[in-house]
Image (cartoon, rainbow, N blue to C red):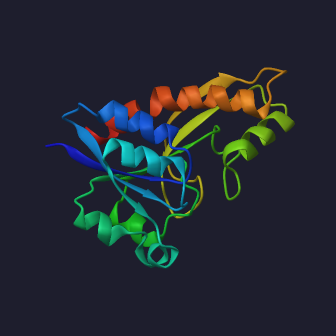
Amino acid sequence: MSKKLAIFASGAGSNAQKIIDYFKNSSTAAVTLILCNKPGAGVLSIAEREGIEHVLIEKAQYKIDGYASFLKEKGIDFVILAGFLWKIPQALIDAYPNRIVNIHPALLPKYGGKGMYGVHVHEAVIKNKEKESGITIHYVDEHYDHGDVIFQAKCTVAPDDTPETLAQKIHQLEHAHFPRVIESLITK
Protein backbone atom coordinates (compact mmCIF):
# COMPACT_ATOMS: atom_id res chain seq x y z
CA MET A 1 0.00 0.00 0.00
CA SER A 2 1.37 3.41 -1.01
CA LYS A 3 2.35 5.76 1.81
CA LYS A 4 1.02 9.31 1.83
CA LEU A 5 3.66 11.98 2.32
CA ALA A 6 3.14 15.56 3.49
CA ILE A 7 5.82 18.16 2.88
CA PHE A 8 6.18 21.25 5.05
CA ALA A 9 8.13 23.99 3.24
CA SER A 10 8.73 27.73 3.48
CA GLY A 11 10.56 28.66 0.29
CA ALA A 12 11.21 28.01 -3.38
CA GLY A 13 10.59 24.28 -3.09
CA SER A 14 13.50 22.75 -5.01
CA ASN A 15 13.74 19.83 -2.56
CA ALA A 16 9.96 19.42 -2.59
CA GLN A 17 10.05 19.21 -6.40
CA LYS A 18 12.78 16.55 -6.33
CA ILE A 19 10.77 14.50 -3.81
CA ILE A 20 7.56 14.85 -5.85
CA ASP A 21 9.41 13.79 -9.01
CA TYR A 22 11.10 10.85 -7.29
CA PHE A 23 7.81 9.38 -6.07
CA LYS A 24 5.67 10.38 -9.08
CA ASN A 25 5.46 6.88 -10.56
CA SER A 26 6.23 4.98 -7.37
CA SER A 27 4.07 2.32 -5.77
CA THR A 28 5.89 3.01 -2.47
CA ALA A 29 4.71 6.55 -1.73
CA ALA A 30 3.29 9.77 -3.12
CA VAL A 31 3.35 13.38 -2.01
CA THR A 32 -0.33 14.12 -1.38
CA LEU A 33 -0.16 17.31 0.67
CA ILE A 34 2.03 20.41 0.90
CA LEU A 35 1.83 22.82 3.83
CA CYS A 36 3.51 26.22 3.63
CA ASN A 37 3.81 29.13 6.05
CA LYS A 38 4.71 31.85 3.51
CA PRO A 39 2.17 33.33 1.10
CA GLY A 40 3.67 33.47 -2.38
CA ALA A 41 6.39 30.88 -1.70
CA GLY A 42 7.55 28.98 -4.76
CA VAL A 43 6.55 25.65 -3.24
CA LEU A 44 2.88 26.71 -3.51
CA SER A 45 3.29 27.19 -7.27
CA ILE A 46 4.87 23.74 -7.47
CA ALA A 47 1.92 22.21 -5.61
CA GLU A 48 -0.50 23.97 -7.93
CA ARG A 49 1.35 22.85 -11.07
CA GLU A 50 1.63 19.26 -9.80
CA GLY A 51 -2.03 19.08 -8.74
CA ILE A 52 -1.14 18.44 -5.11
CA GLU A 53 -3.42 19.66 -2.35
CA HIS A 54 -1.79 22.54 -0.51
CA VAL A 55 -2.52 24.57 2.59
CA LEU A 56 -1.29 27.94 3.72
CA ILE A 57 -0.58 27.46 7.42
CA GLU A 58 -2.40 29.67 9.90
CA LYS A 59 -0.09 30.42 12.83
CA ALA A 60 -2.80 30.12 15.50
CA GLN A 61 -3.83 26.66 14.26
CA TYR A 62 -0.21 25.60 13.89
CA LYS A 63 0.53 26.49 17.52
CA ILE A 64 -2.36 24.30 18.69
CA ASP A 65 -1.24 21.00 17.18
CA GLY A 66 1.01 21.64 14.19
CA TYR A 67 -1.86 20.51 11.96
CA ALA A 68 -1.53 16.97 13.35
CA SER A 69 -5.30 16.38 13.39
CA PHE A 70 -5.57 17.64 9.79
CA LEU A 71 -2.71 15.36 8.69
CA LYS A 72 -4.40 12.39 10.38
CA GLU A 73 -7.71 13.25 8.62
CA LYS A 74 -5.86 13.22 5.31
CA GLY A 75 -4.30 9.84 6.07
CA ILE A 76 -0.73 11.16 6.03
CA ASP A 77 1.81 8.49 6.97
CA PHE A 78 5.04 10.48 6.95
CA VAL A 79 5.99 14.16 7.31
CA ILE A 80 8.95 15.73 5.50
CA LEU A 81 10.43 19.13 6.29
CA ALA A 82 12.01 20.61 3.18
CA GLY A 83 13.19 24.09 4.03
CA PHE A 84 10.54 24.65 6.68
CA LEU A 85 11.70 27.25 9.18
CA TRP A 86 9.23 27.01 12.07
CA LYS A 87 9.82 24.84 15.11
CA ILE A 88 7.63 21.73 15.14
CA PRO A 89 5.09 21.66 18.01
CA GLN A 90 5.22 18.78 20.45
CA ALA A 91 1.70 17.68 19.44
CA LEU A 92 2.87 16.99 15.89
CA ILE A 93 5.99 15.18 17.11
CA ASP A 94 3.81 13.02 19.38
CA ALA A 95 1.38 12.28 16.54
CA TYR A 96 4.20 11.17 14.18
CA PRO A 97 6.98 9.63 16.31
CA ASN A 98 10.02 8.84 14.13
CA ARG A 99 7.94 9.77 11.09
CA ILE A 100 9.02 13.41 10.72
CA VAL A 101 12.33 14.05 8.95
CA ASN A 102 14.22 17.22 8.20
CA ILE A 103 17.14 18.06 5.95
CA HIS A 104 19.72 20.55 7.22
CA PRO A 105 22.40 22.19 5.01
CA ALA A 106 25.35 21.40 7.29
CA LEU A 107 26.97 18.53 9.12
CA LEU A 108 25.10 18.54 12.42
CA PRO A 109 25.71 19.01 15.28
CA LYS A 110 27.75 21.90 13.84
CA TYR A 111 25.88 24.91 12.46
CA GLY A 112 22.44 23.95 13.69
CA GLY A 113 19.86 25.59 15.89
CA LYS A 114 17.60 28.60 15.77
CA GLY A 115 18.58 31.06 13.04
CA MET A 116 20.87 28.58 11.30
CA TYR A 117 19.31 28.06 7.90
CA GLY A 118 20.18 28.69 4.26
CA VAL A 119 22.81 31.32 3.58
CA HIS A 120 23.39 31.90 7.33
CA VAL A 121 24.76 28.36 7.61
CA HIS A 122 27.02 28.72 4.58
CA GLU A 123 28.36 32.09 5.76
CA ALA A 124 29.24 30.58 9.16
CA VAL A 125 30.94 27.55 7.59
CA ILE A 126 33.10 29.77 5.37
CA LYS A 127 33.83 32.31 8.12
CA ASN A 128 35.11 29.48 10.34
CA LYS A 129 37.32 28.16 7.51
CA GLU A 130 35.80 24.68 7.60
CA LYS A 131 37.35 22.23 5.14
CA GLU A 132 34.07 20.40 4.56
CA SER A 133 30.35 20.87 4.84
CA GLY A 134 27.40 18.82 3.73
CA ILE A 135 23.88 17.77 4.58
CA THR A 136 22.26 16.05 7.51
CA ILE A 137 18.96 14.22 7.30
CA HIS A 138 17.57 13.66 10.77
CA TYR A 139 14.46 12.82 12.74
CA VAL A 140 12.69 15.82 14.23
CA ASP A 141 12.37 16.24 17.97
CA GLU A 142 11.40 19.16 20.19
CA HIS A 143 14.66 21.07 19.54
CA TYR A 144 15.89 22.76 16.36
CA ASP A 145 18.21 20.50 14.32
CA HIS A 146 18.62 18.02 17.15
CA GLY A 147 16.92 14.68 16.44
CA ASP A 148 18.77 11.45 15.69
CA VAL A 149 20.89 11.62 12.54
CA ILE A 150 19.74 9.30 9.76
CA PHE A 151 22.20 10.21 7.00
CA GLN A 152 25.00 12.64 6.21
CA ALA A 153 26.83 13.44 2.98
CA LYS A 154 29.89 15.68 2.70
CA CYS A 155 31.42 18.07 0.22
CA THR A 156 34.69 19.98 0.21
CA VAL A 157 34.68 23.67 1.04
CA ALA A 158 37.17 25.24 -1.38
CA PRO A 159 39.24 28.27 -0.28
CA ASP A 160 37.48 30.38 -2.93
CA ASP A 161 33.94 29.20 -2.13
CA THR A 162 31.35 31.86 -1.44
CA PRO A 163 28.07 31.24 0.41
CA GLU A 164 26.42 31.01 -3.02
CA THR A 165 28.85 28.46 -4.49
CA LEU A 166 28.71 26.40 -1.31
CA ALA A 167 24.90 26.53 -1.45
CA GLN A 168 25.05 25.05 -4.97
CA LYS A 169 27.18 22.15 -3.73
CA ILE A 170 24.79 21.58 -0.82
CA HIS A 171 21.73 21.65 -3.11
CA GLN A 172 23.33 18.97 -5.29
CA LEU A 173 23.77 16.74 -2.24
CA GLU A 174 20.21 17.44 -1.04
CA HIS A 175 18.67 16.63 -4.41
CA ALA A 176 20.77 13.49 -4.87
CA HIS A 177 20.12 11.99 -1.43
CA PHE A 178 16.94 13.27 0.25
CA PRO A 179 14.34 11.38 -1.85
CA ARG A 180 16.31 8.13 -1.67
CA VAL A 181 16.76 8.37 2.10
CA ILE A 182 13.02 9.09 2.54
CA GLU A 183 12.23 5.98 0.50
CA SER A 184 14.55 3.86 2.67
CA LEU A 185 12.77 5.11 5.82
CA ILE A 186 9.22 4.48 4.64
CA THR A 187 10.01 1.00 3.37
CA LYS A 188 11.62 -0.18 6.63
Give the side of residue 62 with respect to residue 79, left or right: right
User: Where does the image place residue 160, in percent across and percent down from the top left?
Assistant: 84, 21
User: In percent of the image, x 65 and y 23: which residue is there?
Assistant: 155
Residue 69's quadrant in the figure? bottom left
User: Can see residue 123?
Assistant: yes
Q: Quadrant of residue 183?
A: top left
Where does the N terminus fall, quadrant-wise?
A: top left
User: Residue drawn at (49%, 30%), measured in percent from left and top?
Assistant: 175
185 lies above or below 4: above
Residue drawn at 31 percent across, 69 percent down? 70
Q: From the top left corner, tell me how far across and down residue 171 is, in percent.
A: 58, 31
Q: Could one spot residue 81 in this view of the protein? A: no
Q: Position of residue 67 (x, y in %)?
A: 38, 69
Name the one closer to the observer, 36 or 162: 36
Q: 148 or 3: which is nearer to us?
A: 3
Count the labels in the image: 0
Residue depicted at x 54% and y 56%: 40
Residue 46 x %, y %: 43, 44
Q: Pick the residue in front: 136 or 5.
A: 5
Left or right of 99? Residue 113 is right
Left/right placement of residue 65 relative to residue 124 reads: left
Which residue sits furthest left?
1
Image quadrant containing the C terminus? top left
